[in-house]
Amino acid sequence: MRAFGYWYGTFGGEVINNVRWGTEETFQYCFDGIPQKSIVSIGTVASGLRKPENRELFESGFAKLLEVLQPHTIIVYGSDNLPCFDSIRQKVKIVKFQSERALAFAEASS
């Protein structure tokens, strides 16, 4: 994915990289090839964030993403209803897209 994004970018194409991380040992390479101070996307759907142990891992990876990449905009697919997003909204633009499941529930309740 990163190689294609790099290649496409060399032709002037705009690339929004999707950032994913695992446990802390992935932090040393999971941000490689993504330009600093750019737009990135992340997903919170199916990330298990309702479990406290998953939330802690997500938030530590998210903090590392901010430190390493310093994005100006983050596109979030899924919920952005987490303290880690609230703490950066003054510095980083957050653009949220609801998941299809959330949209279906919203439609069913209206």
Image (cartoon, rainbow, N blue to C red):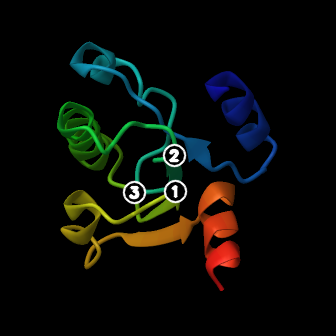
Q: Which quarter shows the C terminus?
A: bottom right
| SS assignment at label 3 | loop
Q: Earlier in the sequence, mark 2 or mark 1?
A: 2
Residue that label 3 marks: 71
Q: Are marks 3 and 2 in contact (CB under 8 Å)?
A: no
Whether 44 is drawn above or below 8: the answer is below
The image quarter containing residue 93 is bottom left
**Residue 83 placement, left or right of 50:** left
Q: Is residue 99 visible?
A: no
From the image, state whether disc 1 or disc 3 is nearer to you: 1
**Residue 20 placement, left or right of 109:** left
Q: Is residue 4 visible?
A: yes
Residue that label 1 marks: 78
Residue that protrudes farthest toward the front in the picture: 109
At a point 19% along the width and 38% down the height, the residue shown is 60
Residue that label 2 marks: 45
- 58 or 88, which is in the foreground? 58
Q: Could you tell me residue 82's position as x and y percent?
A: 27, 61
Badge 1: residue crowd in 10 Å (few <14, some 14–19, many ≥20) = some
| SS assignment at label 1 | loop
Q: Earlier in the sequence, mark 3 or mark 2?
A: 2
At a point 39% along the width and 28% down the height, the residue shown is 21
At a point 28% along the width and 49% down the height, the residue shown is 66
| SS assignment at label 2 | loop
Amino acid type, mark 1: Gly
**Residue 64 placement, left or right of 39:** left
At a point 23% along the width and 32% down the height, the residue shown is 57
